[in-house]
């Protein structure tokens, strides 16, 4: 297995084929021939990711969705992003690499994450056709909901919904996992 310890500036250009046939641990984003590390592996990040998998997994039949963690997603010909979680409708054809726009991409901030870099990733999701992205900030205990239309709002409580679905994710319930 290859490791992704270098920054995107240090990594030489690689082909899409090389990226797709190489195992990185953890997986990396592929952006215009460069590999970009993803910040993962901290307790709070993992806790939020786990509870979201449980919530969506428990309700996947009722909500008509499937939750998939860290799955390569082709946002255009030269870019592959790996969202922390993505939500797709059930019943669609299976793709080993997601090329059909998901209903939702979810990112969970780690202390080292920078909004400027994350916003480029989110823009790639929107360009692909993803209608909404949720960004969970475990440190601030806030969820930023970004829509392709340009709408941006922050929630500390209430319920996160997903248009056209019965999805209902209580914000407080998600962040409560950090107090266990």
Image (spheres, helix red, strand yellow):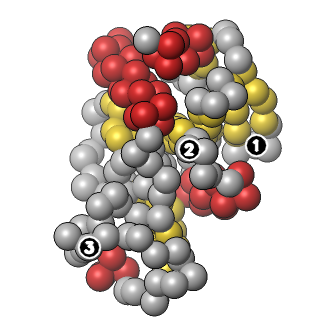
Picture coordinates of residue 99 (x, y %)? 40, 57
Q: In which quadrant is the C terminus drawn? A: top left
What residue would you read off at disc 2?
A: 110
Residue 66 visible in the shown view: yes
- In the image, is residue 155 above or below residue 147? above
Measuring 56% from the left and 44% from the top, which residue is drawn there?
Answer: 110
What residue would you read off at disc 1?
A: 149
What residue would you read off at disc 3?
A: 2
How many numbered circles are shown? 3
- In the image, is residue 16 above or below residue 92? below
Which residue appears farthest toward the left when viewing the image?
Answer: 1
* 72 left or right of 102 in image: left
Measuring 78% from the left and 36% from the top, which residue is drawn there?
Answer: 152
Element on which disc 3 rests: loop
- Which badge, 3 or 1, comes first in the chain's sequence? 3
| Residue nearest the viewer, comparing 40 with 125 | 40
């Amino acid at each position: 297995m290859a490791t992704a310890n270098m920054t995107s500036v240090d990594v030489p250009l690689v082909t899409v084929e090389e990226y797709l046939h190489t195992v990185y641990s953890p997986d990396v984003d592929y952006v215009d021939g460069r590999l970009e590390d993803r910040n993962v592996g901290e307790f709070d990040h993992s806790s939020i990711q786990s509870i979201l998998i449980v919530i969506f997994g428990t309700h996947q039949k009722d909500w008509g969705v499937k939750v998939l963690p860290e799955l390569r997603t082709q946002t255009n010909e030269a870019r592959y992003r790996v969202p922390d979680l993505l939500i797709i409708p059930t019943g669609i054809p299976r793709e080993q690499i997601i090329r059909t726009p998901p209903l939702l991409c979810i990112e969970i901030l780690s202390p080292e994450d920078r909004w400027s870099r994350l916003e480029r990733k989110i823009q790639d999701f929107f360009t692909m056709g993803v209608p909404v992205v949720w960004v969970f900030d475990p440190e601030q205990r806030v969820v930023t909901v970004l829509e392709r239309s340009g709408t941006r709002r922050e929630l500390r409580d209430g319920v996160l919904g997903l248009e056209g679905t019965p999805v209902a994710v209580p914000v407080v319930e998600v962040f409560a996992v950090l107090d266990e």
